[in-house]
């Protein structure tokens, strides 16, 4: 079967899909034949552009605004995706926000919001989608973590903690739903050239790239290919794993 048709007939929901890694993932899944729901929170125009790109690829698509930290909004989103595209077979928990600075300077509200988007967001989306997957006894869940969830990063304590939580969530959920034929994996990218690095200066980005054995930042499309593989039938015996495409920064 041609690569682009591996996900023919599947429905995918990608959170935080209006830009960066999420956008690349949505397009990769669409190229593989999936019908794709593009979730976003504030960037309606960018999300609409992703939907248009998916339609140009021949993929059925829709956009839907929802704050993944709001369980009611997530339930409504999943209901609408199910009504218009079909019940989701693939969930990519990608929505995230960044935080850069000393822990002693971090407001409690910022900590709470970061945990709500990353951890509660993954919880809300999984809780909304899993009943359907369990009844059909099949499904793919891919959670986007970070290399900092594996190693920790100074001045990114909250972000590192949230992404480490995603890894624990992934491994535990994989054990819980594996008997129903559902796989749960995480992708923990290294430094990728997206808006997430906007808080860094050009010199800091260059210094980071020099630390990477491959000598460059990753591209969103490279992370998306890992996600697309984990969503495919070829990854049916892979679950509870954490893949870290990071250019050799951590081996």
Image: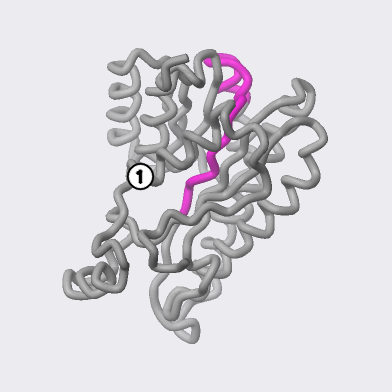
Relative to 173, 87 lies left or right: left
Task: Please give the name of the residue rendered at 57% of the width and 42% of the height, measured from the top-left corner.
Answer: 142
Q: Indicate how the structure is coloured in the image.
A: one colour
Q: Based on the picture, tell me whether residue 92 belongs to the magenta stretch.
A: yes
Label 1: element kind: helix
Q: Tell me the crowding category of disc 1: few under 14, some 14 to 19, or many 20 or more residues within 10 angstroms, Cα based.
A: some
Query: Which residue bears the numbered disc 1?
Result: 222
The image quarter in which residue 56 lies: top left
Task: Please give the name of the residue rendered at 46% of the width and 76% of the height, measured from the top-left corner.
Answer: 153
The image quarter in which residue 124 lies: top right
Q: Nearer the viewer, residue 177 or 248?
A: 248
**Measured along the vertical axis of the image, is residue 102 above or below residue 73?**
below
**Measured along the vertical axis of the image, is residue 64 above or below residue 248?**
above
Task: Please give the name of the residue rendered at 29% of the width and 22% of the height, measured from the top-left corner.
Answer: 52
Determine if residue 61 is in view: no
Q: Position of residue 188 (x, y in %)?
A: 49, 56
Relative to 68, 71 lies left or right: right
Relative to 212, 88 lies left or right: right
Q: Nearer the viewer, residue 26 or 244?
A: 244
Q: Which residues are magenta?
A: 79-96
Q: Nearer the viewer, residue 243 or 51?
A: 243
Determine if residue 64 is in view: yes
Q: Position of residue 96 (x, y in %)?
A: 47, 53
Q: Based on the picture, tell me whether residue 159 belongs to the magenta stretch.
A: no
Q: Position of residue 205 (x, y in %)?
A: 23, 69
Q: Residue furthest left?
A: 202
Count how many numbered circles sit on residues in the image.
Answer: 1
Q: Position of residue 199 (x, y in %)?
A: 29, 68
**Measured along the vertical axis of the image, is residue 11 above or below residue 199?**
above
Task: Please give the name of the residue rendered at 71% of the width and 39% of the height, measured from the top-left corner.
Answer: 127
Q: Residue furthest bottom?
A: 104
């Amino acid at each position: 079967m041609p690569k682009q048709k591996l996900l023919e007939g599947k429905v995918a929901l990608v959170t935080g899909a209006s830009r960066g890694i999420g956008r690349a993932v949505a397009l990769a899944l669409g190229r593989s034949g999936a019908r794709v729901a593009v979730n976003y929170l504030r960037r309606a125009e960018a999300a609409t552009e992703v939907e248009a790109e998916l339609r140009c690829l021949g993929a059925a698509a829709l956009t839907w605004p929802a704050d993944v930290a709001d369980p009611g909004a997530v339930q409504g989103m999943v209901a609408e995706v199910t009504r218009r595209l079909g019940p989701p077979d693939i969930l990519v928990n990608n929505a995230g926000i960044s935080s850069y600075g000393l822990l002693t300077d971090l407001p409690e509200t910022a900590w709470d919001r970061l945990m709500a988007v990353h951890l509660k967001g993954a919880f809300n989306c999984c809780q909304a989608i899993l009943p359907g997957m369990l009844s059909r006894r099949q499904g793919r869940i891919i959670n986007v973590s970070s290399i900092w969830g594996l190693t920790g990063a100074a001045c990114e304590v909250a972000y590192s903690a949230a992404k480490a939580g995603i890894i624990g969530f992934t491994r535990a959920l994989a054990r819980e739903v594996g008997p129903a034929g559902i796989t749960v994996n995480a992708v923990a990218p290294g430094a990728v050239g997206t808006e997430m690095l906007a808080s860094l200066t050009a010199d800091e980005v260059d210094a980071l790239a020099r630390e990477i054995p491959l000598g460059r930042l990753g591209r969103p499309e490279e992370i998306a290919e890992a996600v697309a593989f984990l969503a495919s039938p070829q990854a049916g015996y892979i679950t509870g794993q954490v893949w870290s495409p990071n250019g050799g920064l951590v081996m």
